[in-house]
Amino acid sequence: MTSSGVDGKVLRKKLNKVVLAYSGGLDTSVIVPWLRENYGCEVVCFTADVGQGVQELEGLEQKAKASGACQLVVKDLKEEFVRDFVFPCLRAGAIYERKYLLGTSMARPVIAKAMVDVAKEVGADAVSHGCTGKGNDQVRFELTFFALNPQLTVVAPWREWEITGREDAIEYAIKHNVHVPVTKKSIYSRDRNLWHLSHEGDVLEDPASEPKEDMYMMTVDPKEAPDEPEYVKIGIVEGLPVSINGNKLSPASLVSELNKIGGKHGIGRVDMVENRLVGMKSRGVYETPGGTILFTAVSELESLTLDRETIQIKDFLALKYAELVYAGRWFDPLRESMDAFMKEITKTSTGSVTLKLYKGSVSVTGRESPNSLYRQDISSFESGEIYNQADAAGFIRLYGLPMRVRAMLEKGL
Amino acid sequence: MTSSGVDGKVLRKKLNKVVLAYSGGLDTSVIVPWLRENYGCEVVCFTADVGQGVQELEGLEQKAKASGACQLVVKDLKEEFVRDFVFPCLRAGAIYERKYLLGTSMARPVIAKAMVDVAKEVGADAVSHGCTGKGNDQVRFELTFFALNPQLTVVAPWREWEITGREDAIEYAIKHNVHVPVTKKSIYSRDRNLWHLSHEGDVLEDPASEPKEDMYMMTVDPKEAPDEPEYVKIGIVEGLPVSINGNKLSPASLVSELNKIGGKHGIGRVDMVENRLVGMKSRGVYETPGGTILFTAVSELESLTLDRETIQIKDFLALKYAELVYAGRWFDPLRESMDAFMKEITKTSTGSVTLKLYKGSVSVTGRESPNSLYRQDISSFESGEIYNQADAAGFIRLYGLPMRVRAMLEKGL
Amino acid sequence: MTSSGVDGKVLRKKLNKVVLAYSGGLDTSVIVPWLRENYGCEVVCFTADVGQGVQELEGLEQKAKASGACQLVVKDLKEEFVRDFVFPCLRAGAIYERKYLLGTSMARPVIAKAMVDVAKEVGADAVSHGCTGKGNDQVRFELTFFALNPQLTVVAPWREWEITGREDAIEYAIKHNVHVPVTKKSIYSRDRNLWHLSHEGDVLEDPASEPKEDMYMMTVDPKEAPDEPEYVKIGIVEGLPVSINGNKLSPASLVSELNKIGGKHGIGRVDMVENRLVGMKSRGVYETPGGTILFTAVSELESLTLDRETIQIKDFLALKYAELVYAGRWFDPLRESMDAFMKEITKTSTGSVTLKLYKGSVSVTGRESPNSLYRQDISSFESGEIYNQADAAGFIRLYGLPMRVRAMLEKGL
Amino acid sequence: MTSSGVDGKVLRKKLNKVVLAYSGGLDTSVIVPWLRENYGCEVVCFTADVGQGVQELEGLEQKAKASGACQLVVKDLKEEFVRDFVFPCLRAGAIYERKYLLGTSMARPVIAKAMVDVAKEVGADAVSHGCTGKGNDQVRFELTFFALNPQLTVVAPWREWEITGREDAIEYAIKHNVHVPVTKKSIYSRDRNLWHLSHEGDVLEDPASEPKEDMYMMTVDPKEAPDEPEYVKIGIVEGLPVSINGNKLSPASLVSELNKIGGKHGIGRVDMVENRLVGMKSRGVYETPGGTILFTAVSELESLTLDRETIQIKDFLALKYAELVYAGRWFDPLRESMDAFMKEITKTSTGSVTLKLYKGSVSVTGRESPNSLYRQDISSFESGEIYNQADAAGFIRLYGLPMRVRAMLEKGL
């Protein structure tokens, strides 16, 4: 099903209006004319502010229109991002493959959700993104589109066009009057938001080589961090952080403030080789200063409020929760149902945790909770009323009964 | 069933010969006369060298005999401990409640196993230990006895006698000619072996208070650690460490060496509130310098050799594995079967990992493996033969099919 | 702490008033005078109607008072039992050790909860039950008491008194004017409620021997069942059954009605060797006619409404859910949080399932749901718009990428 | 990369020799000329005897050659299939989505493995199969090819050609001198092997409609089954069946014999809606008479030999094991490692189980094992030496300690 496009060119498919996830960089800028040319559609550029930095939003409307867009829509999603996406993951303890705090994974669905809303507002019949065919982000965008509006056509130009690299893209840009940034592109592929900054590419492609110090942007080298530790006290209500050193802050402000504190001490660098959803391994480096502090705080508080079996089940579900978020399945009833579990099980996770930040590491120095299951009167070496040591003999005999029976069997008793 | 003991006293039960887990400290020394008095038995003291420190073994035989023991048996279990107990846990990635590297949990079964052997050698019909009725160690000792020789009678004096504290014990000791140490007992309750040192008690009983710096013994304060990072390269074969910076070492020597290196940099301090098997919470501080380095190394190597789903299943089983070890169920077919899984799945975990130690933290700087599943030719931004980006479109459409169908249903499509 | 009881006898502990779980049988009747004698307390007998059969409730007050009770409280818990205990387990798919539908496990907490309420109403300071020290029920009663009112003293006579068997109990009964039933006690130990009937003891103690046909009470021998199948259609809303063949019924009525239908066809007999919480194995036979039909119906409906990964996670959690319920941990935040998951994930489990009952077996013949994810337009052999077969090639190549990479590595490619 | 084929037609890609999974039916017969025409290759047909029935193998060579094949290779894989694929799944207790005994899932890898061997023997550079792009089988074939020889090119004609249905295929067949069966194609899509027979399509496409009785081939209608039950005793060694009623049989013979016995009694029909790996739901009906008997037997024996926690972990892993097998990941280190677990944990699963077959249902009537952990001396109502009822009090108090502490906290105690 083809028809005639702007230049009389044969179209892949006729679309009316496309909402494009737009950053202003070369990668998404060249998509604007390409969509118009190949789908004969109007292009509405959409940029979400998820805390990637103010400078990236300046002059954007002009740029978008110069590239051929009919409109630029900008939305500030910072509070929604942290409150509705980041904090549930924090409460769940969701960490992907032992180390990754899911910074990009959580940002994609909030952006894609906003795109679906914008598509409705501007009457668009399609959405588009600038992700390559090798990464996780294409999956995260498209699954969110599927879940929230399956009628939208999804166009992923980097998977289907003939432009195969940066040189090609520049050439195409020049031919279509798209502004080409004079600043040389970074040797790293990066994604930044309020929660984290990720780095990929260049020397990182060899998992045996150490990242260069000048790559890092949110955290100082631990060697350059202050020589004195800093203590920070995180207040938590029902599994969600609410204050720093007693000052109540909105979710986004709280994370922003902790990024500064953590960054100053070189906290939250992660260097890992991870398994992407599309089946390949990749090596990435992440900076998540505030997030690292918060995950430690929430986990420590749980050590007071959750019992043994609960921690085991929660930790197992956290593995699955992280997997779903990583895989772009935010708007999946399975994640939502697991969230219902997490919300319920952390109802008593209220209190505060004091952490010491020093030269790249976070260590806990104190935890308090009105709901603490820790009782000094039970655990101390003194005998007490609630716990009778003689009970332990019976406990061990029954707990170990299957072992005794098995051993007796082996000995023919 | 009672009879007449040494002093004409009525016996709880007549035993012939008891093998006692003996440290030479007051807690186990007073047990010697008490067993003789209450069970009318000979007492064979047994001390395992699991790396708790040489000074603790000096003059021990004399002390034991002075307390009334007929014999002291000492066995060096260091290599067995590390090779057969520590390294399987390391390979399994077994960490209890997010932080505890199981130092004491792994030592109890190797000691209890040796006691069962000694009991056979000396013809004893019972075994005894000096654990209280509040801790995990009583369970770990007794479950091992159950599993390896269910016919042995187990005597746990601290659970059944009238001595209720240190003052009582000293009084009893003096009355029975047991040597009372002149050195004041530490304010902390400690357990040390080649893998770790644990601290409990005193100010630690308040989970809101920070441990004092003078408590630590295996690690320096990170603030006192060298100002320059140190790199260390761990060689690993099939999930088990074999070398440091290219030097092959026996299991015990390797851990011992890494303790020195890690301790110098303040590595491996853990402060946690944990759930004991007997149902209570307790707060402990652990020092595991070498172990912390090794867990990081093994995990990083797996990031090259294991795929996504394998890591998920392994991490789930690691939670269970840790739980079993913590609970004293080392000699349980379930742990052994899980170990068969771990052994098989880590067959390709061979290679080396380079780590940077600095002021209390370990970070990875490089990993290499002949079995690495990471391929730069797939993950790089260049297009390649093995991975075709166009395949991703089909992948996402089928992976997301249930989400699309659900969304269509909701929209009545 | 002892004092003087009714007969001037020295008391174990002085209690004021005890609420006793009372059935009217010998086992609980002898407890009444024993409690008064040993604890110097008043005894309030409590009997719950959980559907164990009307004849068991007749003349009960007279009997209780004759045994020395000051009062008998009877409560009809049938609807609460099914609605708040049975149906959540059904929705969760909770089956213990592959076969047991948890009939007794679910009844104990509803009874114990009512006892805590009665204790409050009558001002009692203790509760008591007639369970032995070998079974699961003591745990289920006592854990519920712990959770709902930890201040109540719990007395478990069969664990602490000198009466060791039926003969002893009869002798004690006669001495204390307790009515001894003339009917010979059944050779089986049974527990019956609206959901099921369990059998233990006698020939069942040999797991190699087949139960005798005359043991069964709720179900006919499949050989005696009708020669024609019967179809029954179960209506389900959000994972909970609401109707039979289109007739809406209350939870208890619905189960009661299905018991008749299922029982007539010999449905729901289970013969199993199970692992009790107290560490031993036991052999039991259960009859759960209505329950078996309902579990099949709910599971079949889910085959329409849940996707693959959701079923996997739900089935895993069902294993844990069943374990908690079996272990008496109904009023545990962990079970409650898992229930939040179950409630959320079954929100779309609405529809109906038709089942064929014949000679002991239940088989599904049809399922329907407005929320069905099954789409004939996708799964049929015809090609369609939503599913493009060409997509499968890309899907398989990426899904199988880790296998290809591993294989290439092995071949040195 | 194209070149010139047999008819001067432009080729998709030049292949030398292709090994085709060949059944002799229309679906795979038309592939022979199509491969030659489109890839310019020789075609070696391969047929595995996995117990699909003798008549299907007769006259096959002639047919294959008439279609243009250069050779037909037939291999009898029946014993290998049952011994190396079916029995490990049985030992693992692997059941997909509560009901499916994986008949087709286990057959695909044994066939694909043989094709890789044949490809090596005949010097082929490619393999091909007749699966559609909608099913699971394409994944199972191709993942096995990936794992065993990633250098083989895989051709899946039904995913890439223009033939879209049966009519098209017949037309193509006639044009290319391929024999078209005179017998009308069944209205069902079927797959048969020694373990099972599956049915899909036609009225089954409506999940609300009951299958017609004439569809079934391996099992009689339970209504037509004998009016007298039949008892069968299965002997098991280390989790694997070895004998029927005392007669030792090879794996394939044992299954074959049980199919007859079970089929006669209408055992093993399963009607289900399942989630395919490719994201869609489908409805299938399976007949697995012998398999149903064996799964029951193995599970019942485990009820004697495995303890509570072991059953829980095994059942969780069985869910994952089934998922991997269903998804075609037989030759995956993850499945192999899980198999190492299963092999180890079932080492004591030796003994026999007696089952009663009657009118479609299997029920256990007896289990025996030299390694049984069931002990009548513990579980009976008599008191004994190994189990002391008084121990239960201590057990419950410690087991319930977290619940008591939580409740005390709530009450401010």
Image (cartoon, coloured by chain):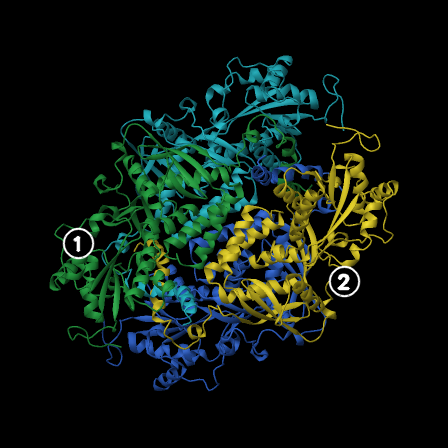
Chain colours: A blue, B yellow, C cyan, D green
Disc 2 marks which amino acid? Glu
A269 w.r.t. A62: above or below? above
Q: Which corner quadrant holds the N terminus of chain D?
A: bottom left
How far across and down, in percent of the image, does residue C374 sit? 31, 51
Subunit that carries the residue with mark 2: B
Q: Say yes or no: labels 1 and 2 on the same chain.
A: no
Amino acid at circle 1 = Gly
Q: Which residue is mark 1?
A: D59
How far across and down, in percent of the image, does residue D36 sit?
20, 68
Give neighbour class at mark 1: few <14, some 14-19, many 20+ (Cα, 10 Å).
Answer: few
Of the pair C296 and A230, the residue shown nearer to us: C296
Q: Is residue C306 visible?
A: no
Q: Is residue C46 left or right of residue D135?
A: right
> Residue D394 at x, y = what percent?
66, 36
In this figure, which residue is indicated by the disc labeled 2? B213
Q: Which mark is residue C48?
A: none
Locate residue C200, reporting x and y percent. Answer: 50, 27
